[in-house]
Image: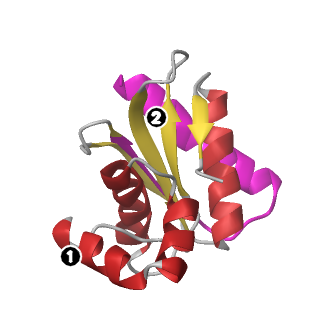
Amino acid sequence: MKLEIAQKMVTAALAAARTRNLKPLAVAVLDARGALKAFAAEDGTSLKRAEIATGKAAGALAMGLGSRTLGTMATDRPHFVAAVTHAVGGLLIPVAGGVLIRDGAGALIGAVGISGDTSDNDEAAAVAGIQAAGLKADPGA
């Protein structure tokens, strides 16, 4: 994923959040290998929002599932999700807001993680950012 695309997703996600009057957000974009490509935190985000946003994206990448699905798994199979969280070094936040990024052919090219508002609103902003970059959002819903 090119840096310009990652930055466009961050900008668009934050713009969508402002039009919806969401709380201040932190947005992390990871490429397919899990490397941080772009990040921004709005003024007023609470402490550790960067780590939470990154954990949502990294967990989605680690499992190949949107973090909304990971949240359902955490309810249904808590021991499994706890074990996976340990296996991936703690970078797995199993609540909505971590959305996989797919190209036009459906190939996984990265993930966006957002934290700051409700999980549903975080996910909506992530989807908006991905779609604004002309890519497919896969929240795992």
Quadrant containing the C terminus is: bottom right
Answer with left or right where residue 141 lies relative to residue 10. right
Residue holding disc 1: 86
| SS for callout 1 | helix
Question: Which residues lie in the magenta part?
Answer: 1-30
Residue 58, image x and y in percent? Answer: 34, 56
Give the residue drawn at x 39%, y 37%.
110
Mark 1, Cα crowd under 10 Å, few <14 / some 14-19 / many 20+, is few
**Which image quadrant for residue 121?**
bottom right
Magenta stretch contains residue 3: yes
**Which image quadrant for residue 138?**
top right
Magenta stretch contains residue 97: no
Disc 1 from disc 2: Cα separation: 30 Å
Q: Is residue 42 visible?
A: no
Q: Earlier in the sequence, mark 1 or mark 2?
A: 2
Mark identifier at residue 7: 2
Amino acid found under the numbered disc labelled 1:
His
Name the residue nearer the viewer: 53 or 66: 66
Residues at badges 1 and 2 in contact (C-beta under 8 Å)? no
